[in-house]
Image: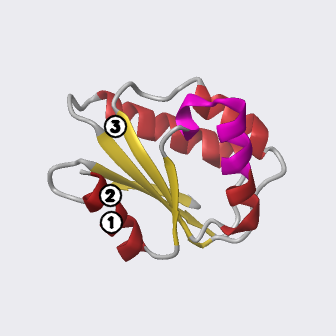
């Protein structure tokens, strides 16, 4: 699968979504469902780090995917940090914020996994 979802820490407070190579809308929607299911099993807030370091291609249907994800944001989703998101994803983040998507209210960008974790630590 071109998108992997896994826990970053033993306390299961940070979820990693790792995008590799080419991925499509179906892959994205499956990842959204998997992440929502994992978060729904937790009583505490869960932050998400989305790593695009090994994926440079974004499908054309990304807006459809964003709408799909918007309808499935778990109540305990915390900050979401995009790592090496690239211009298209960064543009999408800006548009999502202007449209008032609840999923975009706590979005950040980082240039590395270390920077993402440091940002999360500063926010806590």
List the residue tagged with mark 2.
120
Residue 51 percent coordinates (x, y): 51, 65
Single out the mark in the foreground, 2 or 3.
2
Magenta residues, as a range?
A: 92-104
Q: Is residue 124 left or right of residue 70?
A: left
Residue 89 is a magenta residue: no
Query: Which residue shows up at 46% across the image and 76% down it?
Result: 112
Q: Residue furthest left?
A: 11
Numbered disc 1: secondary structure: helix
Name the quarter where the N terminus is drawn. bottom right
Which badge, 2 or 3, is on the more N-terminal residue?
Answer: 3
Query: Which residue shows up at 24% across the image and 48% down it?
Result: 13
Residue 96 is a magenta residue: yes
List the residue tagged with mark 3.
38
Kindly indicate whether the residue at mark 2 contacts the one at mark 1 (C-beta within 8 angstroms).
Answer: yes
Q: Residues within 10 Å of mark 1 (few under 14, many from 20)?
A: some
Front-most of residues 14 and 41 = 14
Which badge, 3 or 1, is on the more N-terminal residue?
Answer: 3
Kindly indicate whether the residue at mark 3 contacts the one at mark 2 (C-beta within 8 angstroms).
Answer: no
The disc label shown at residue 2, or none: none
Query: Which residue shows up at 48% across the image and 43% down it?
Result: 106
Q: Residues within 10 Å of mark 3 (few under 14, many from 20)?
A: some
Numbered disc 2: secondary structure: helix
The disc label shown at residue 117, or none: 1
Q: Residues within 10 Å of mark 2 (few under 14, many from 20)?
A: some
Residue 71 percent coordinates (x, y): 59, 23
């Amino acid at each position: 699968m071109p998108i992997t979802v896994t826990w970053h820490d033993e306390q299961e407070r940070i979820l990693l979504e790792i995008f590799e190579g080419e991925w499509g809308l179906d892959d994205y929607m499956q990842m959204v469902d998997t992440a929502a299911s994992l978060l729904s099993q937790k009583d505490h807030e869960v932050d998400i780090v989305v790593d695009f370091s090994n994926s440079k291609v974004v499908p054309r249907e990304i807006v459809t995917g964003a709408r799909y994800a918007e309808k499935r944001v778990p109540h305990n989703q915390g900050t979401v940090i995009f790592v090496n998101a690239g211009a298209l994803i960064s543009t999408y983040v800006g548009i999502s914020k202007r449209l008032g998507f609840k999923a975009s209210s706590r979005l950040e960008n980082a240039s590395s996994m270390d920077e993402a974790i440091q940002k999360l630590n500063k926010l806590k």
